[in-house]
Image: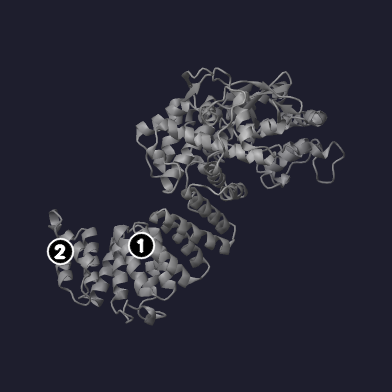
Amino acid sequence: MTVVPGASPFPGLRPFTEIDSARFFGRTATAHTLLAKWLENRLVVVYGPTGAGKSSLLRAGVLPQLSPEVAHVLPVGRISPGAGAAGAGAPSPGRAANPFAESVLRTWSGTGDTSTLPPALRDRLDGRGPGPDGRRWPADPNRPILAAVDQFEDFFAPGTSHLDPLREQFMTLLGEAVAALPDLHLLLMIRQNVRARLAPYEAALAGGEGVARVRVGALDRRSAIAAYAEPMRRAGRPLPPESAAACIDELLRSRVVDAAGTVSVLTADAVPPAYLQLVAAARWRDTADRVASLGPDLMEPAARVDAVLGAHLTQVIVTEARRYHLGAGDVRRWLVHTFVTERGRRATVDEGLVTTAGMPNALLAALAERYVLASEWRSGSRRFELFDDRLIPPLQAAVPDWPAADALAAEIGAIDYLQAALISLADGDLAAARIHADEVLRRDAEDPRTLAQAVMLRADLDDAQGRIEQAERGYREAAQLYESLPDAESSGRALAAAGRLLLRTGRLGSAVEDLQPASARLPAELDVQTDLARALWYSGQRWAAAAIFSTVLTIAPLTPAALDDLDRAVRLGPGGPDTADIADPGGSVGPGDSTETRAARALALARLGRSATAAAETSAVLDDAPDSGPVLWRAAGVLQTIGDDSRAVDLLERALQARAPALLAYQREQVHRMLRRPGAMA
């Protein structure tokens, strides 16, 4: 899909996992501290606010540092919010007596086969008491057993007071397991606002020893800069240091307006990791996608951050408003009137029995899960506020007359729904992306570019979901819309997408028809050129295909797809199948085509550092085509690459005189340029 790069170093709002450890930055000291405490203590409680990155710290910061020689580490456990739904009835055969215990045992096993767990742990948690030693457990008394439960707040899910007997039973069983396994070290990760409910059980879960606690909060400025800039650098897109610092500084600053119109700046001392990931992921998408509607590199950092957080707000609002059959504009207006004071500061609102400030409690809980609101428990009830001060500016901008009781929110228009669709797609929520894209089209966007982007996005979704005919029609429609703007580059991308779709489905002639104009509109896009060459090759036009492959490898010799296809071209050259199909533009068989392809392949190999293979291939093609200008030209490139400048000059001079075939005009220009180079090639 054109709107989402395939190798983003930023996960957005999903937690980092073990496979993301190489791009997890900003938490090195905390990760080392947590690991040391886990190895030394029977119970470690990790707590912090929603969105602070507790799960990411465990999975990407701590677990990758552990090896089997240091400890036996169980898979990260979870207690499903619905674990207690089964009630307290008698267990069925092979099933845990306590549903909370069943949930955590299943996840600790990793596969659901609890026989792989330490017998003392399994037998006590399933209520059977001490049992025989398990032969399948590879325990080593010299290694601690490290067991973690993530999102332990689910154990205390709201509205589950009827499960208190089962909760008490599980805590008793878990405490007995800790006592029976002296090498068991527990790590429980819990939200800060629920931590007080865990406190009464900590002593029992620590096996009579002390309890270690680690707080995970927002990122300080230095750590935030590292978390923002380092993944970019590792991914090959380094940012200027001042650019990364400016972005983080804008995440720390909130320009708010009071009811009198006075502007003030609120400065925080730490950045919420969730918002940092939103801004970083958007920056990555925008640098990868040339048709992004937000051009962050052309925007001031403050406007860039406001745009990203505003887009996130809009996406959450339109999604949740639709779910609860509410007007998106009404929800946005309600947010600013309920959670922003006359002084332009965050307001706190106590949760009602069914509704809060006129909105269903379920909506507020959903907004808290999406980092729009934050909640904490006080005196047995929840209290809500905006997740961070940094949301106030985009909210106030969306409701310019917010101090007035009857102020209207700015209409959520087609461009807002398009942004919501793009964010949903980046999050992997194809269903929500389609709903928002359809809303753009339903609203008949006045801006033709917004309409074209929505049509292109819906075609991408059709393509991803296997709706081939709809995707093909959508890509062609998007190409026409972009052409009418005019925007030849975006039109080329739409045609390229259609051509690739047709190539995948075997409609080679139609693929060539779309990829040829796409190639003309995007001459610098080597993947488009390679796809066109592949379509030409498969459709039998191998002379044209080999010429394009050769050109691609001359421009970018490290293009692996083109090199693979050139290898295939060499194998299917003279003596291979369908040789007669390798025709020149005039329709005759080109006897030098195979040698030109082999010479291009040799040049690519030389630039890849495979000098011996490249030299051998070059000698062979020179023997086969000693008077071919293109072969001599590329052979000279091989010799120059491997350091034989004197022979390279000789071949370039011969290339200018060659006649079988002679050099084309642009090739002669390249040869003259090489001969005019200073140093050995002068």
Q: Is residue 680 above or below residue 192?
A: below
- Residue 105 is situated, as x and y percent measured from the top left of the image, at 72, 40
SS class of the residue under badge 1?
Answer: helix
Distance from label 1 to label 2 (Cα)?
A: 33 Å
Taking depth in this image into account, of 81 and 376 the one nearest to the observer is: 376
- Where 304 falls versus 510 (above or below)? above
Q: Amino acid at mark 2?
A: Val
Which one is nearer the viewer's eye here, 471 or 15?
A: 471
| Residue occupied by mark 2 | 649
Please state which amino acid type lies under the numbered disc 1.
Ala
Residue holding disc 1: 520
Density class for disc 1 (Cα within 10 Å; few <14, some 14-19, many ≥20) is some
Judged from this view, the residue extending furthest toward the right is 90
Residue 33 at x, y = what percent?
53, 27
Task: Give how far across and how far down residue 544 sits, in percent.
Answer: 35, 72
Q: Earlier in the sequence, mark 1 or mark 2?
A: 1
